Amino acid sequence: MTAHSFLGVLRSRWYYLAGGGVVLALLVVALLPPAIEVEIAVVDRGDVRATIVDEGRTRMREVYVVSAPVTGRLLRVAVEPGDLVERNDGLARMTRGVTGFLDPRSDSEARAVVGAAEARLRAATAERELADLEDARMQKLATARLIAEATRDTAAARRRAAIASEAAAVAELRRARSALLAAGLDEGLDDGRKASTTQITLRAPVAGTVLAVPQKSEASVAAGTPVVVLGDPTRIDVVAEFLSQDAVRVQPGDRAFIENWGERELGRGPVNARVERVEPVARTKVSALGIEEQRSRIVFELIEPVPAPLRAHDYRVDARIVTTEADAAVRVPLGALWRQGEAWRVFVVEQGRARLRAVTLGPQDDNYRAITEGLEQGERVVVFPTAAVTDGIRVREIPR
């Protein structure tokens, strides 16, 4: 066999071997399980805030209740809820109270008592005048030493007693007349009736907004009855009641946001706030599902100008408190994490295969979880892995 023919045979064998290798490789690829389609997310950096949120109410910090200072008749109140008033503006008027009209018999009795008191006063006045004259005469006689000292002292004592009797008669007359005056009558008139015209004006103690008018119509009211409720719209707080197990994680000064007050419709964002006070008392509340809950009241202070829609009292809002946060942290979507025993793990996509990797977790918000160890920015992880995804299995991204 010549060298030329030997090389030809060798070359043909290499062709057969190469062709067989290609066929074998195709066969192996055909027999391999297909790659699993998975949803993939890229690990990035961003802010992660762990928060708790609950329903709250706006509250005007300074609320003033204007009440009736005396018992009387309240005239119709002119102001309406929402009206703006200045300090010392008149809010309402009222007249001094009366006890009611007397029936004819009681009226006659009251007038008779007044007449008797007037008669006693006239008698007491006459006795006092006589005692004055007698005392003056006894003083002159005593000066001339024509009577004994005891006689002069007796005359002086009778004069003092007459003065006291006259004062008692005056007081008795006033008491008798009060029965007629309390009924709005003047016993000096023949018709016996005269309406009281004394009026009292209730004025605003501060400038503010009228929140409520508990007693709008004309009526007889007792002293201390609320008439108008005012509030100062320049000082607004937010009060929310959180579950007691959440309230123990909150401290005064924590950062917070006031949400769902209508900011989306106005093209604005949440209002910045901070925790001012955490009340150390829990109250039992019944939820909409009928479950008893222990809730603690937390007061928030707004740290930016209050938007006009929030300058109101008892409006519903959401209060969100930042408990922990991480700035520019490595983060993954919550759906990429799953628990294996006590450890948290993710599937990292490396060269088309899912590789199981343990991670250490940081703060969590509604969408992301911060990763302190185990991942780097830019790596790709499987989101919502199914039971078919195992360590080392081939995966490919679901087309979007």
Image (spheres, rainbow, N blue to C red):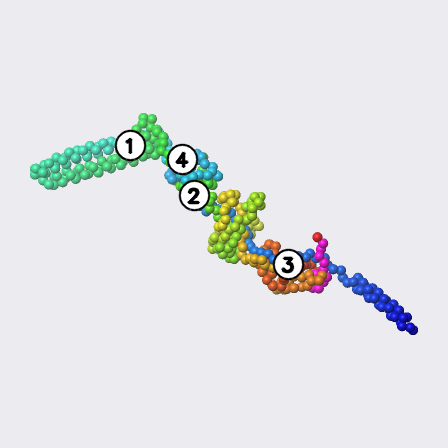
Q: Residue at x 76, y 60 (%)?
A: 34
SS class, disc 1: helix
For badge 2, the amino acid type reads Tyr
Magenta-span inclusion, residue 309:
no
Q: Is residue 338 left or right of residue 33?
A: left
| Other-residue count near label 1 (Cα within 10 Å), few / some / many at <14 / 14–19 / ≥20 | many
Cα separation, mark 4 vs mark 3, equals 70 Å
SS class, disc 3: loop
Q: Which is more toward the observer, 22 or 15?
A: 15
For badge 1, the amino acid type reads Val
First reached walking from the N terminus: tag 4 or tag 3: 3
For badge 4, the amino acid type reads Arg
Cα separation, mark 1 vs mark 3, equals 99 Å
Cα separation, mark 1 vs mark 2, equals 45 Å
For badge 3, the amino acid type reads Val
Q: Is residue 64 left or right of residue 12?
A: left
- Mark 3 or mark 2, whichever is nearer to me: 3
Q: Which mark is residue 64?
A: 2
Q: Residue furthest bottom?
A: 1
SS class, disc 2: strand
Magenta residues span: 389-399
First reached walking from the N terminus: tag 1 or tag 3: 3
First reached walking from the N terminus: tag 1 or tag 2: 2
- Mark 4 or mark 3, whichever is nearer to me: 3
**Does residue 99 show up?**
no
SS class, disc 4: strand
Residue matched to label 1 = 114
Q: Residue at x 53, y 56 (%)?
A: 323
First reached walking from the N terminus: tag 3 or tag 2: 3
Q: Position of residue 225 (x, y in %)?
A: 41, 40
- Mark 4 or mark 1, whichever is nearer to me: 4
- Mark 1 or mark 3, whichever is nearer to me: 3
